[in-house]
Amino acid sequence: MAIRLGNNCENCDNLMSNNMCKEHGVMVGSNYTCDKFEMKANLITDRDCNTCLRYEKEDCANPTKAAPGMMCSVWAPLSARA
């Protein structure tokens, strides 16, 4: 099974920080998309220990090696916090 970015509002350049669509002027979420979808030019690529949810936590897979600038196979984005 292939994994792809969805053509939804979270990946759209028209999404503003308050979950408002600047194209349509309505509140949107990850379940929405439209024909005016514009993929964000730059996706977040700063994946390392500093941006990992597990950094300096009990579930860090490499607590003795983890450091800013490093990355491992169990990296989890900080935005994954509930």
Image (cartoon, grey):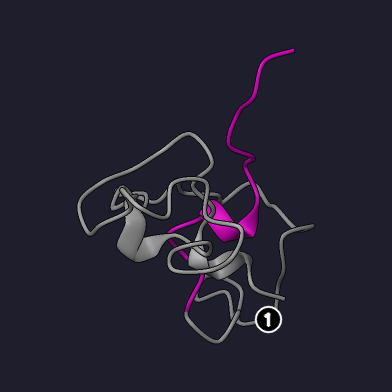
Q: Residue 57's x, y, as percent?
A: 53, 69
Q: Quadrant of residue 51?
A: bottom left
| Residue 23 among those drawn in magenta | no
Residue 19 at x, y = what percent? 60, 79
Q: Quadrant of the C terminus?
A: bottom right
Find the residue positioned furthest to the bottom: 18
- The amino acid at mark 1 is Val
User: What main secondary structure does the magenta stretch of the protein show?
Assistant: loop
| Pointer 1 residue | 26
Q: Is residue 3 left or right of residue 48?
A: right
**Can residue 4 be found in the magenta stretch?**
yes
Q: Position of residue 8 (x, y in %)?
A: 65, 50
Residue range corresponding to the magenta coloring: 1-16
Q: 22 above or below 60?
A: below
- Residue 1 vs residue 56, the one in the foreground: 56
Q: Residues within 10 Å of mark 1 (few under 14, many from 20)?
A: few
Which residue sits furthest right?
31
* Above or below, comparing residue 36 to residue 53 in the picture: above
